[in-house]
Image (cartoon, rainbow, N blue to C red):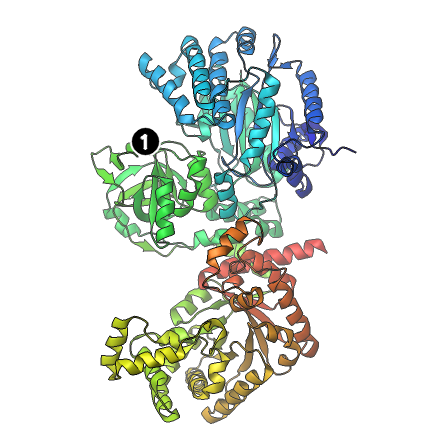
Amino acid sequence: MTKEYVYSFDEVKGANTQEWVFKLGNKGAQLAEMTEAGLPVPQGFTISTEACNEFYDEGKKWPKGLETQVKSKLEKLEKEQGKKLGAGENPLFVSVRSGSYVSMPGMMDTILNLGMNDESVLAFAKKTKNDRAAWDSYRRFITMFGNVVMEVAHSKFEEILDNAKDTKGVKFDTELDAEDLKALIPKYKELIMSEAGKDFPQDPWEQLVMSIDAVFGSWNTPRAIAYRRINNLRKDAGTGVNVQAMVFGNMGQDSGTGVSFTRNPATGKKEHYGEFLIDAQGEDVVAGIRTPKPVDSMKDVLPDVYEELLKIYDTLENHYKDLQDFEFTIEDKKLYLLQTRNGKRTAQAAIKIAVDMEKEGLISKEEAVLKVKPEQLDQLLHKQLDQVAVKAAHVITKGINASPGAAVGKIVFTAEKAKAMIEENPKEKLILVRLETSPDDIEGMHAAKGILTARGGATSHAAVVARGMGKPCVAGAGDISIDEKAGEMKTKDGLVFKEMDKISLDGGTGQVFQGEIPLVEAELSGDFSKLMGWADGFRTLKVKTNADTPKDAKLARGFGAEGIGLCRTEHMFFEGERIMAVREMILSENLEGRKKALDKLLPFQKSDFKGIFEAMDGLPVIIRLLDPPLHEFLPKENEEIEALSKDMGVAVDKLKAKIAELHEFNPMLGFRGCRLGVVFPEINEMQIRAIFEAALEVKEAGKKPIPEIEVPLIGKLEEFTKIKALVGKMAKETGAEGKVHYRVGTMIEVPRAALTADEIAKEAEFLSFGTNDLTQMTCGFSRDDAGKFLAPYVEMGIYARDPFQSIDQEGVGKLMQICIEKARKTNKDIEIGICGEHGGEPRSVEFCHRIGLNEVSCSPYRVPIARLAAAQAAIKDKQKK
C-alpha cells in the first residue's frame, strides 16, 4: 500500500498536535488548523516531512507515489478554485513554501506566483484589468525562481531592477509602470540562461516539480544547518512543502501585505504590533527592502479591513492561547491569512505574556509556567547600559527597538568576519552592522553581541531572528549609510565609523551610542517574581548553586538558590600569598614542611568559609575538598619558573625537577581528588579544620552554618571511609562535634563508584554526580581534547548534543540511574544531586527530575533557569499521569 504523503488543508482535523506538526511541519499543520477554525485561508495542500526525508534517502528523488498524489491534490485545488495552474483565461497561481516542525525564519525557501509564464501573465492582466500587477508578479516570480531554484544570485536580478529605476529616475520599484516591468522580463531570462545555462521553464508543472525539489533541498543548506545547530533543533525532522493558492497584495492601493503579532513580542504588551505595505508582496515586508508602516495606520487607508484584522487578533489568541505571529495579504480589500505560528519573543515578553494571559483567564498557572523557555531567562539576567552614562553619551542614530537588551562592541560589517573573529577569539565583543540582514547571515548574527541594520522594520528578518536568539537589535536606522565594501558607516551629522570602532546599542530604546558605555546589573520585574513563585510551587527538585565566594553566594541566594551544591576550594588557592603557600607546600620534602605551609593557608581558608556561611545563613553548603592535581599550581613557562625561583629562593633546576615529577600523561585520571587526601591527609586536615573553625565562629555570631563536606573522585569505598574518619577526628579536635550540624558525602564521578553505590551509600550521607568527569570517564573522552571531534559528531547525529553541555541520557544517564537504584536499596533516604553546569541545562534538569534526584546545582546566573526547568518537568510529569 502506498504511503500517504500529501494532505489538503481541509482534510486534516485537529492539526494542532505534536503528531500533525511533525508530519506536516508547523506551517502546514496551522494552515489546516486555521481552515478548520473557519479563518480566511487560501486553500492548498501540504507535502509531508516524511516525503522530504525519503527524498534524501532516495538520492534526491521523489518517493514512489508522491507525483501521483501531488497531481491529485492539485486537480482538487484547481476544481475548487475554478482555475487551471498557469493556464486558461483565469489561471491559477500558487506559492510553494517550506515549513518544519518549528519555525526557522528565512532559513528555508519560498517561491511565490508559481504558474506565471509568457501566456498566463497576459491572461492575468486581462482578467484583473491590471497590467502593472501582472508584470510585477511575473518579474518577481522569475527573480525568486531564478534565485531559489536555478541558483542565480539575487543581487544580479537586483542590478537589472536598479538600472531600470536609475534610467527612469525613480527610487522605488512601485514607481515603475507596466511597460517598465514588462521590459525586465527578457533581461531576466537572458540572465538565467547566462548564469544557469538553461532556459527559464514555461511549463507550470515543471516549475512546480523544480520548486518542490528546491524546498526539499533547502532543508540542508548551510544556513539551515547552522540555524538548527545554534538552536539545538532536530536534524532528522525534514521540512514540509506547502502549495497554496496565491492571493495578490500587489494589485494596487486596495491591496497589500503584512506581518503582525497579537502582542508586542519585544515587551509583551497587549497591543497591535505589526507592519504592512500597500501594493506589495510578502517578501517586501520581511526582507526590509521597503520600510513598512505600523499596522494601526491601516485604519486610515483600509478601515474595513483594519476592523476585520482586529477581530483576527482575538480569534487567534482565543484559539491558540498564545502569542501568534501571522502573515496576511489583502487582495482588493479582502483579507486572507497565509500562516500563523507561536511568535518568537524575548524573555521579558515571554514572562509578561504568560502572567497577563493567566490574569485574563486564558490559561492556568501551570500553562503560564510552561509558556516560558527556561534558557530564555538568561537574557533577563544580562547587564544593561548604565543610564547615568547614557545621559552623557552621544547618540549617533535611533532606529526601531526590535529586540531589547544592551550590547557594546566593535563594528563588523559582514557575517563572515564576525564568525571568523569569534572562532579566533571567543571573548571578542562584536556588533554586526548591516544594510539589512539575510538568512545567510545567521552565523554572524550568532557570533555578534548585537545587531544594527539601516533597513527593515520590527518584523524584518533581523528583528525576528535577533528576538529568537535573545540578541539586542536596532533595525531600520534609516539616517545611517553603510558602505560594506569600504568598511565604513556614516551618520547624518557627518561622523564616520570604521570597522573595529566601538559602539553601544540599546535594543529596548532603539538608540545607538558612540563608544563604550558601562554595563550594570539588570533589574527584574514583578512579573518575573510572580512567575518564579508559581514555578517554585510546582517543582520538587531543590535548586542550589555552585559558588566559591561570598559575592557569588549572595548573588545566587538572590536568584532563589536553596544552598550551595558545590564550593570548589581550589579556586581559593590561586590568589597572591595563597598560591605561594600552596607552592611552598608542594615543594616541601617532608611532612613538617608541608604542615608549615598549610598553616599559612589555614586563615585564608577559614576566612573564605566564614564569608560563605554568613551569606548562606541557614542553608546547606557543600564544600568539595581539594580536587585538581598539584601540577596545576606550578608555573609552566620558563620565565614564570625563573621568577618563582627568585621569589621562593629555590633553584630553577629543583623547580623543573618537581614539575617533571608531577607531570602526568592523563592528569584527569591521575593523582587528584581523594587520592591526594589519602596520600597527603594533612591537606584535607587543614581544609576540614578551616571548615569547622569557620562554622563555630559564624554560629557564635548568631548565624546558622550548615557545612556538608564532599570527598571528590572516589572509586572505592575505602577511599571515602578513610577521609570520613578524618572528618570525624577533626570535628572532635575543633569542638564542632555536637555543636555544628554537618554531613559527609561524596561525588560520583568514577564509573566504578556508580556501580558500587550500594556499598558507598551505607557510609555516605549524600551523593552528588560530577557529570563532567563522569561523562569523560564513561564515554572515554578527554574533556580538553574532545572539542576536536565532538562538533562533527553532533553535526552527523552520532550524538544529538555535546554530552558536556547536555547529559548523554542513553549512556551516562543510564549509569546515573543504576547508581541511584543501587544507592537507595541500601539507604532509601539518601539525598542525591548533581553539580556542574549540567545542573542548569533545561534538558538535563528535566532528566534529573525524571530519574528521581533530590537536587541540582549550577552557576548563580543559571539558578532561575534550573528553577523554571524543574517546575516544567514536574508539570509535564503530572500531565502524563
Q: Residues within 10 Å of mark 1 (few under 14, many from 20)?
A: some
Is 718 positioned to the left or the right of 283 in the image? right
Q: Work out whether residue 402 or residue 415 is closer to the camera in this orientation and state it.
A: 415
Q: Amino acid at mark 1?
A: Gly
Residue in the image at 66% along x and 43% along y: 18
Residue in the image at 51% along x and 89% along y: 726
Residue in the image at 43% along x and 55% along y: 381
The x, y position of residue 668, in whole percent, is: 48, 71
Is 26 positioned to the left or the right of 773 in the image? right
Q: Considering only vertical position in the picture, is 250 above or below 525?
A: above
Element marked by disc 1: loop
For the view shown, which residue lies furthest in the left direction?
494
Q: Considering only vertical position in the picture, is 32 above or below 628?
A: above
Q: Work out whether residue 250 or residue 659 is closer to the camera in this orientation and state it.
A: 659
Q: Which residue is mark 1?
A: 478
The x, y position of residue 503, in whole percent, is: 28, 45
Q: Is residue 700 visible?
A: yes
The x, y position of residue 875, in whole percent, is: 64, 56
Q: Quadrant of the C terminus?
A: bottom right
